[in-house]
Image (cartoon, grey):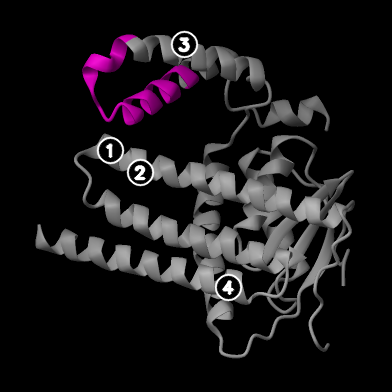
Amino acid sequence: MPDSEHRRSAILRPGFSSLLSVALFGGLWWVLAEGAWRAWGVGAVTVIAAVAASHLLWPPRVARVSPVGLAAFLFFFLWQSLRGGLVVAALALRPRLRLRPDLHELDLRLPPGPARVLLADALSLMPGTVSAGLAGDTLTVHLLDRGLVTEADLRQAEGKVAALFGLKLSAGEGGEGAGD
Amino acid sequence: MILTELASTVLLLAGGAFFLAGTVGLMRFPDVYCRLHALAKVDNLGLGLVVLGLMLRADGLAQALKLGLVWLLALAASATVAYLVARRALRRGIAPWRGEGP
């Protein structure tokens, strides 16, 4: 992906992002210590180590997350995983098991990296799909039932992930109707 | 408060029901890929409901958030494990069950 594309959607500047990760890991420590203040000595060391590790493993350059996109993604994801659980539970409990499973290949428009990993993980928790392989630009998805999921559903999930990372998907490549 | 206790109990029971449904799916679904659906989705919804139910009984905000964190980590772990199991099965050439008819 072109870097300028990335930069345009930049929300976090490096300095601000360091401050944000200190706040984030500090909050995380507070939660883990269940609000115990006397644990702050160990906490300070742990938070500093966590910030350093996170900057090494996932440089701030990559960590551009759109807050609006994040909220939209979380809402979409929670709703879909609720639906996913209900639909699959209903299928499992039906007296006559009638499934038409299939494999579907999705040509990804997302750039390689965290966005693809998030999509693959999120699809596994949504109704009727489990990610089964990521090779090149193709994500292989197992469908529990062909009637349950359409290409448009997968594209919608892809779009939500793109919005979360502040990316614009090119309409042309990947294309619709890439499957059956 | 009696109302939160009640809501918590309902959530915990609903969570247990989903775990049961997930286990039924695990036993009834025809192949490894379909069984992953039962584990990755139904059990996670069950865990989510149990976590919500326990959050209502938590002592303070930090403990409630910690329970939420447990759910998030379990979500990430089970989605990743489902992916790894499915990928391994595909690579070993285990053909997905295709059903009886069109």
Give the Cα distance between marks 2 and 1: 6 Å
| Residue type pointed to by label 3 | Ile
Q: Secondary structure at mark 4?
A: helix
| Residue type pointed to by label 2 | Leu
Q: Are marks 2 and 3 in contact (CB under 8 Å)?
A: no
Q: Which residue is mark 1?
A: B63
Q: Which residue is mark 4?
A: B25
Magenta stretch containing residue A174, yes or no?
no
| Residue type pointed to by label 1 | Gln
Give the quarter of the image for residue A146: bottom right
Q: Which residue is mark 2?
A: B67
Give the Cα distance between marks 2 and 3: 24 Å
Q: Residue at x 35, y 57 (%)?
A: B50
| Residues beneath discs 2 and 3 located on the same chain | no
Residue situated in front as seen by the camera: A36 or A154: A36
User: What number is the disc on residue A48?
Assistant: 3
Tell me the subunit letter for badge 3.
A
Q: How crowded is the residue under tag 3: few (<14 C-alpha within 10 Å), some, or many (20+)?
A: some
Residue situated in front as seen by the camera: A84 or A21: A84
Tell me the subunit letter for badge 2.
B
Nearer the camera: disc 2 or disc 3 = 2
Q: Which numbered disc flags the more N-terminal residue, 2 or 4?
A: 4
Q: Position of residue A164 (x, y in %)?
A: 61, 42
| Residues beneath discs 2 and 4 located on the same chain | yes
| Residue type pointed to by label 4 | Gly
